[in-house]
Image (spheres, rainbow, N blue to C red):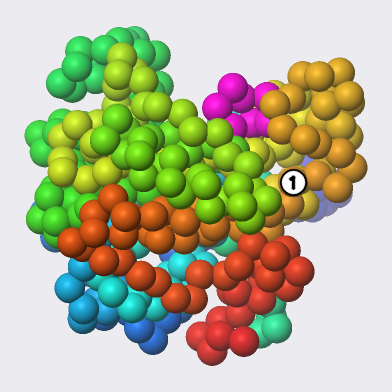
Amino acid sequence: MNQTARLRGGLVVLIAVAMVVMAARDFSRAGVDEPLYPSASHSQCYLLSTDAPALRGTRGDTDVYVFDSGVPGATVLVLGGTHPNEPAGFLAAYVLTEHLSMERGRAIIIPRANRSAFTHTEPGDATPAFVEIPTVDGARKFRVGSRTTSPLDQWPDPDVYRHTPSGQELSGAETRNLNRSFPGRTDGNFTERIAAAITHLIEREGVDLVIDLHEASPEYPVINAIIAHDRALELATMANFNLQAAGLNYAIEPSPRNFHGLSHRELGDATQALAILMETANVTQGRLRGASSADRVLSGQDDCYERAARAGLVRVPFDSSGISIEERVGRHLSGVRALIDALAFVLPDKPLSARGIPEFADLRRLGIGHYLAGPTPH
């Protein structure tokens, strides 16, 4: 082998090693949680493994933040990151974690409900692994994950997933979908154990209201919606009156009784809590979009969806302005506030009151980065 060939071979090896090192670095970063800066009014932080010791030390264990006013009242649980490929859900939970203050009752927030699903991206979709949000304290980088638990934590998928206890049969890949696994099983698979831990937390903490934050495609039939368990329909309807008065239109959808595993059905059936799920419209969830990108996640702009809207193929208003992360997070936060306010009428003996939830108009005007500014809120 001549010297040129040896040099060329050595260069190839060096490039290969560099690529392996970069991939290993990115892979290891995927398992590291971004720091959150809970507001000064948070009273406690513990791990979900408190309710499921088998999760301790795994990527299913996750932070639980408690905000206790010290005044007796109701308890609300907010879930973000049930599906980490739906950014408005977990970013709304992050904003709440960093700004919430309770005046009466308690709030519990799990910002990364399926923490394992944050450690990988959607296979075959070339989805961005991170988004960067500028703040006055510099950019903050947030992981965007997958709809399902990492296969490193649960594998292989069965041909058919049978939900427990209903026996409903779904595609085998849904066995790693947290929102098809409720109420969960303590002796089940990895995802079912996460679901069981959340269910047990609801029972142990005496949670009165569960709000699960999600996103869906603009063409999805149930979009910009509040999906409510049978017992939570009155609450959802009352909250929607206030939302409509503020110019925010939501559809009220009853939780289907024959579709199992979802938080709004199973948590309402298995616990005393009123169970709610909310959906916002995100183009990166859809199949009519252009190429995935971090900018598209945040801006919500997409030429393909503009054409789809003109053809009548979407279920929400859509034009060149898109549906930004500010609008989507703002809708979720407005919904949380409206549900908290309405709960006082549904459970008059359990008052619940919160401060620090950004207003929809302020969030759109100032940008989400204003509310993710770092350890010292601005």
Image: 218 above or below 347: above
- Read off the magenta span: 216-223
Image: 302 above or below 200: above
Q: Identify the residue at horizontal 39%, vertical 14% (top origin).
A: 171
Residue 239, percent from left and from top: 46, 49
Q: Which residue is mark 1?
A: 323
Q: Circle 1: is it few (<14), some (14-19), or many (20+) Cα within 10 Å?
A: many
Residue 279, percent from left and from top: 53, 39
- Is residue 121 something one can see in this rendering? no
Q: Identify the residue at horizontal 43%, vertical 34% (top origin).
A: 227
| Residue 226 among magenta residues | no
Q: 35 or 315: which is nearer to us?
A: 315
| Residue 222 among magenta residues | yes
Residue 51, percent from left and from top: 13, 54
Q: 191 or 66: which is nearer to us?
A: 66
Q: Identify the residue at horizontal 10%, vertical 55% (top origin).
A: 204
